[in-house]
Image (cartoon, rainbow, N blue to C red):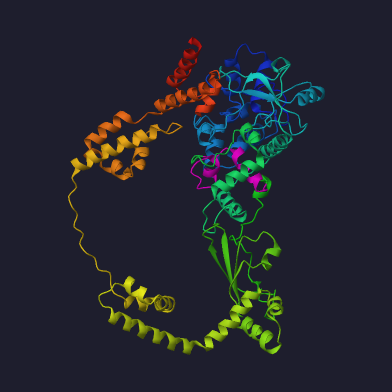
Amino acid sequence: MQHAYFPKLYNDELLYSWFARYHELTCNFNNKQTQRDLFNSNSSLAVPDLPTNLDYFYGTIKHFNGSSLTTLIHEHTLFRYYTAFTSDAVRKIVFEAMKTRKYPRLIHNITGIMASSIKEWTYFRYCPRCVEENMSLSGEIYWKCSQQLPGVYVCIKHKAFLLDSTVRFRNQRRNEFRAAKYTTFSKLEKIQDYSLKTNDFFYILARESNDLIENNYYFSLEQVKSLYKDLIMENGYATIFGTINQQSLGGEFIHYYGEEFLKAVQSMVYPENQNCWLKEITRKHRKVFHPIRHLLLLHFFGIKANSISSTKKREVYAPFGKSPFVCLNKASDHYKKSVVKNVEVKMCKETKRPLGIFQCDCGFVYSRKGPDPHKYNQHEIGQVRKFGDVWIEKLKLCIFTEKMTFAETARVLNCDVGTVKKYINLDDNQKAAPKKLDDIERKKQEWQFLMNSNVELSITEIRKENPALYAYLYRNDRAWLMSKSPKKSYKRQIRNRINWEYRDAEIVGLINEAIKSLLKNNKPVYISISRIGKEISKLALLQKHLDKLPDTKQLLSEIIETRDEFQVRRVQWACNQIIDKGDKLIEWKIRRIAGLNDKTSKKVNQAILNQINQQNTY
């Protein structure tokens, strides 16, 4: 059946709103009549975001409306918003379900709406300025798609805060359409005050959310996962092996947006929680994530939704850029020229940052921690790992031929004076190496003679005979020294059986003396097994073998204190201190001297009151 009349559909108007205005204008007796007119069914539901059975409806009004059914679904429902970051399979199922009556209960599940921790608005939202504008232009008002999106607080056209109407977004009467009217708008509504920073982010999120429903952005899951991985690595939140520093990422994310904004859009980040949405979205995508979460993460990295589709396949992450790299050997004729062909990238064990090792054909090898965010970072050296022959020849030229000082040479070669001295001495030492080998051999013979002369002594005792000789060989040929030294001899230790009965009586005596000593302290001391064990130097024995000491165990059970008992004793001591000074007992003064806060147990509180009452009685 084709309709003889149907109202005009406005730009950005929800299909739900269109249906509701039809119901109002036709003065249908009840909602079931409207459902039969629209969908040829009494059981259809009035769904605001992703309505179904639209194929039948379109057949009844297509002679009025020049738009295709696809256009109606794309531009007048939240289909584009909820499917932008889903798979092709999900998009096809949702689109088919909206056209027909298939899978009506499945739509909100596979799009992640039902399971998401981000809840939709309770009431339809509106912009007061849009309402006035629509009334002046067309004489009608309606529910807009862009103003019903979760997390959208402002109208992107007027930058005004959206307000709640009195019409529930999910009507308890599930087949009832409620149109936008002046009577459904709140007359007085207090708008919560937010910081300027939060207000700015409200507008950005509203703009990006609106962009999703105005355009056909269909991003493949692989494309999104790959993009996030590259962005995280490029911004230094992951190692070169892909391990993400979730604490750093989460902390920076909170700092960037602020807790106020993240809580307002139901996307607060808790880095210590394993189920934190930011951790899950940056790992393997095992579920559908709400569009808000994608938009927040993309904006954090400076990416807009409209640039994802046009973004070409990102190159393999290179923390130090592309080859060739700069040689920083100041002794070479290609200093600061891009001649280094390769870089070996490792991970710094301490900082978990990429570590680049650059090796030039001139023999110069240096490293630095990355990534290199700026071009000038390419001329930085973290550590010189090898100077190479070219550098050493230049060093000799400066010192021996040009007769330059160490300081002058250091400036020419871009190093410190200590490095110059080290490599000059190294060269001299290499020449003296044969002489040093003769010295080591002579020292070995001395050690062999010393051992043969003291066969009954251990290595420690022989070492005391000639400490300097031992130290020399230890420095120059430790492996030989260890192989030629006497081995340790282990003597079997005969353990005497312990008389536990005697030990028990002994410890009981020690504890009694310790208790007397502890109680004589000017300030009360907490009497515990640990304190008594330390006092008598038998803590390990009490901790490990108390079951073998029955009398000791019985005595300890009688004398050790609970926390409450100790605090009561401190109260008594504090009261004595106050009374000795001639002062009156006051609760705050007793607590201060006793070192107690106001969160003590009932037993301790009663002890304080008893002391005060006792003084008042006298």
Q: Is residue 151 visible?
A: yes
Residue 32 location (% of width, % of height): 57, 16
Residue 211 location (% of width, % of height): 69, 40
**In the rendered view, does 510 fall on the left or right side of 90?**
left
From the viewer's side, name the closer residue of 3 and 344. 344
Q: Residue at x 37, y 35 (%)?
A: 517
Residue farthest along the right direction in this orientation: 136
Name which quarter of the figure residue 71 lies in: top right
| Residue 351 to residue 125: above or below | below
Q: Residue at x 69, y 84 (%)?
A: 398
Instruction: Tally the marks.
Output: 0
| Residue 178 to residue 146: above or below | above
Residue 126 in magenta?
no
The residue range painted magenta reads 276-303
| Residue 183 to residue 155: above or below | above
Name which quarter of the figure residue 143 lies in: top right
Q: Residue at x 62, y 29 (%)?
A: 58
Residue 117 location (% of width, % of height): 54, 32
Q: Residue at x 32, y 36 (%)?
A: 513
Q: Is residue 295 visible?
A: no
**In the rendered view, does 403 fall on the left or right side of 268?**
right
Name which quarter of the figure residue 209 lies in: top right
- Can you say which quadrant of the picture contains the N terminus? top right
Residue 125 location (% of width, % of height): 68, 25
From the viewer's side, name the closer residue of 319 and 382. 382
**In the rendered view, does 259 fall on the left or right side of 486?**
right
| Residue 121 to residue 550: above or below | above
